[in-house]
Amino acid sequence: MSPHLPKIRLILIGDEILSGRRQDKHMPHLITLLGERGLQLNAVEIVSDAQAEITAALARSFATGDIVFCCGGIGATPDDRTRQAAAEALGVDLVLHPEAQRLITERCADNERAGRGSGDMSLPENRQRLEMGVFPAGSDIVPNPYNKIPGFFIRDHTFMPGFPVMAWPMMEWTLDQRYPSLHHQVERIEHSFLVFEMPESRIIPALEELERRWPEVRAFSLPSLGKGRPHIDLGVKGEPAAAAQALAYLREEVRRLGGELTP
């Protein structure tokens, strides 16, 4: 029996994604990071910058027990409402995290040494920067190697900026530091082949029977609707031994039903 693994989800926050001004790059990168560790992404959700919508989405998400990566909306401008929404969804106060305060102060000092502004934390602009270290009470920080301004972690939710240069190292750190015990617990494999001269409807009963016989295997069927010779990309994915048996069954069914297949 395969060990039970929690679902892993991605939440993307930002009107710029919904309007098309920016294209998401986080999902394919997270899929790659997970795949390298024998894990997989289960779902993705895109939420607007409206605090009420973020709060509702996070309230649902916190109730699941899933592992969630949340990108966007943790800055200090008026359209950054994720920190506030997370606190509201959890019913806790927002507090300045002491380690975040130290890191942001250090970042301001770094800027001063580089000739970019002042390290005086009494200045209004630096007081505003400290707002980026105000997290829901009970949060831990998530290190940010790019500019030291951290994200935060609470209830298996990792909150990161929307910028890939910051978010992607945070994703990797979280997977390796918080969830190493989940890596490569389940071995999965995927097999597929192309089927010609067969309507998809003809193979559906075999796909249903396959999943009844091998419940740990999932079958898939992807018809080609573009130019060229019509075909179906047919296959299975799951635990290696069961997937191999299911694949042999599926190939035999295609032949029995008159389909032409590739290796």
Image: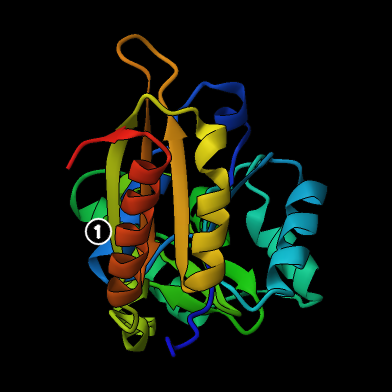
Q: Residue placed at 40% from the left, 60% from the top?
A: 120
Q: Which residue is mark 1?
A: 110
Q: Residue placed at 37% from the left, 70% from the top?
A: 103
Residue 162 image offset from top left, x and y in percent: 46, 46
Q: Nearer the viewer, residue 168 or 139?
A: 168
**SS of the residue under disc 1:** helix
Q: Nearer the viewer, residue 163 or 243?
A: 243
Q: Nearer the viewer, residue 161 or 216?
A: 216
Please state if 56 lies on the left or on the right of 262 as rendered: right
Q: Nearer the viewer, residue 184 or 106?
A: 184
- The quadrant of the image that shows the C terminus is top left
Relative height, residue 205 to residue 242 (above, below):
above
Residue 18 image offset from top left, x and y in percent: 61, 29
Rendered image quadrant of residue 36:
bottom left
Q: Residue furthest top?
A: 227
The reply to whether residue 169 is in sight is no
- The quadrant of the image that shows the N terminus is bottom left
Q: Residue placed at 29% from the left, 60% from the top?
A: 248
Please state if 50 lies on the left or on the right of 80 as rendered: right
The kind of residue on which mark 1 rests is: Asp
Residue 63 image offset from top left, x and y in percent: 74, 75
